[in-house]
Image: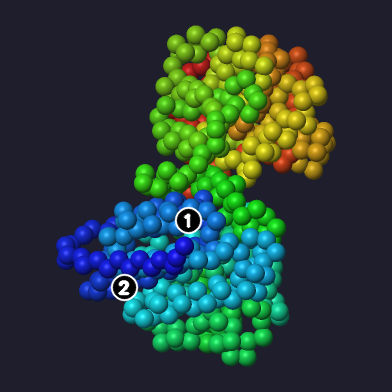
Amino acid sequence: MALTMRIVCVLLLSIPLCYGSVEYKHELQKWPTVAITVLVRNKANSLPYFLSCLSNLDYPKDRIIVWVYSDYNSDKSDDILNDWVDKYSSAYQEVHITTNATTDVMHEDQESITHWSVLRYKHVIKLRENALNFARGVWADYVFMLDADVLLTEPLILKYLINKELPIAAPMLISDGVYSNFWCGMDEFYYYKRTEEYRPILKRKEVGCFDVPMVHTAVLINLNFKDSDMLTYVPDNVKHYQGPEDDIIAFAVGAKTSGINMYICNDHIYGFIPVPLENGDSDDDAEDILNVKMEVLGHGIQLPLYKDLEKYVEYPAYTKLGLTEIFMINLARREERRAIMQRSFKELGLDVTLFEAVDGKSLTEDVMQKYNITLLPTYQDPYHKRPMKAGEIGCFLSHYLIWKKIVDNHYAVTLLLEDDIHFVPFFKLKFLRMMEEIKDLDWDLVYIGRKILMDNEEVAVTDHTTQPLYSYWTLGYVLRESGAKKLIAGEPLSKLVPVDEYLPIMFDKHPTTEWVRHFPERNLKALSAAPLLVHPTHYTGEEGYISDTEDSSIVNPKGVRIEL
């Protein structure tokens, strides 16, 4: 057992390299040197991704110095770090890694491994100050103070932030909740204060860089600012400081005292962060890291994971969650969606069968005739006031063909998923809990994802289910064979409406009586997860939103296309 320090200094040849489309605003100068400093403690679940993201940064590596200090570990954090050093450190100007194996897993005054005791705070304060002084000592232009569970998914992050030329800039990090790496308010005791300004920044309703009283976890400090010499993590070094023994609070108060503004920037999706463990929680943050990985995928982003580091990642065994089958509906041409969903299933351990969707863009009159499709003449989209589109017909056929498959093969219970969904945190746990609650109830269909229109009027059935009223969308639902039989028996292809209109008709909660009267047998017994278990990856109007139903041609009730 020993403290090991590895210093790798690399002499790089002056070979011109292309580092991406973002140019340094001072075009006659090189990109500034950046010291990236990281503290590691029991981060084996996040380190493979953290280090892959670090290696994936689009910034001249000969302008980066890496400093890492690792201690108080009870996992494979040091092994992962050493592996990364062996394989990737030669690309950087310098790499300084200290792995201290002489420490125990806890400080003497810690109640649990996740408890932030006085000694733990003092230790972290000392290390952060060492990191800051290291960057000053190697004459770095910037220091990027990072926690080891930050997932920087935007490769251009350093270029974007450096070009802003702010004294202290933090990229806003997204979690699976309302937690992030900034405060908009600080109370008289120097602790977090809720403000109205926080949520619009967090949800990116307001976009830009905002002057805030606190940034942490991922902080870029411009060491070329003269007053940056006043910055410190040590409470005793902050004039007139009367706050707690806390590194980030001392830093924030000291910056304010020195007249140095701190900014949180949300002009790009820069990265993600797990919600911190609470005192008393297990030190195993695997579920929390899984949740943030699912959040990344929910934003349509493939999280970098280098092959050499993937061996440290443990994936769950595949399961059908006690169901007969799970289907995911996906258009063959939507390869990116398919890849994101397959990665999601791998992370969750879901054994899912891919069902190739009927593509509305290639829908022909022959297909319409093959399935004897006739559109309901009186149908008009409730929002756009138009007839059905080809994409909506393809979507309905995709669901219908799965219903047929369920009946033909006598699948007892099946989960149908669309390919543009985002799973909520702890999805499997919540899904299994819901299924246990309803196991003795009489039901045909259970929504797990939809657009609720009358939330306050829906009646609870169990602790985590309600009786759904009129809803939009069919993001995900559980269907018994009995439900599939009822949906087919309604003969929907002969009086077609969109599938998310058909389901409420069949459980007799649709408000449009003119449509409802065409379906006399409306006896589908429906429930809904509450809260919902899947949500759309994108909403209408958001960047990245794509609709394969809206982006298709209109079809008139006689089955003839009307091109837009």
Q: CA distance from mark 2 to mark 1?
A: 30 Å
**SS state under label 2:** loop
In the rendered view of the protein, which quadrant contains the C terminus? top left
Q: 256 or 485: which is nearer to us?
A: 256
What percent of the width, then of the height, locates residue 375?
58, 18
Does residue 403 appear in this view?
A: yes
Estimate the x, y position of residue 130 in percent, counting from the top left.
46, 77
Density class for disc 2 (Cα within 10 Å; few <14, some 14-19, many ≥20) is some
Q: Residue furthest front?
A: 1
- Marks 2,1: beta carbons within 8 A: no
User: Which of the 4 image quadrants contains residue 240?
Assistant: bottom right
Q: Residue at x 73, y 35 (%)?
A: 433
Residue at the image position 52 percent from the left and 86 percent from the top: 259
Q: Residue at x 65, y 69 (%)?
A: 108
Residue 268, given in percent of the width and then of the height, sits at 46, 58
Decide: is 554 above or below 521. Answer: below
Which numbered tag is attached to residue 32?
2
Q: Nearer the viewer, mark 2 or mark 1?
A: 1
Q: Residue furthest bottom?
A: 240
Inspect the image, locate mark 2, and give the three-letter code of the amino acid beneath it. Pro
Relative depth, front residue between 33 and 473? 33
Q: Secondary structure at mark 1?
A: helix
Left or right of residue 3, residue 12 in this image: left
Q: Quadrant of residue 480?
A: top right
| Relative to 396, residue 267 above or below | below
Numbered circle sitting on residue 77: 1
User: Relative to 141, does residue 94 appear above or below in the rendering?
Assistant: above
The residue sitting at 54% across, 69% down in the picture is: 216
Kind of residue indicated by mark 1: Ser
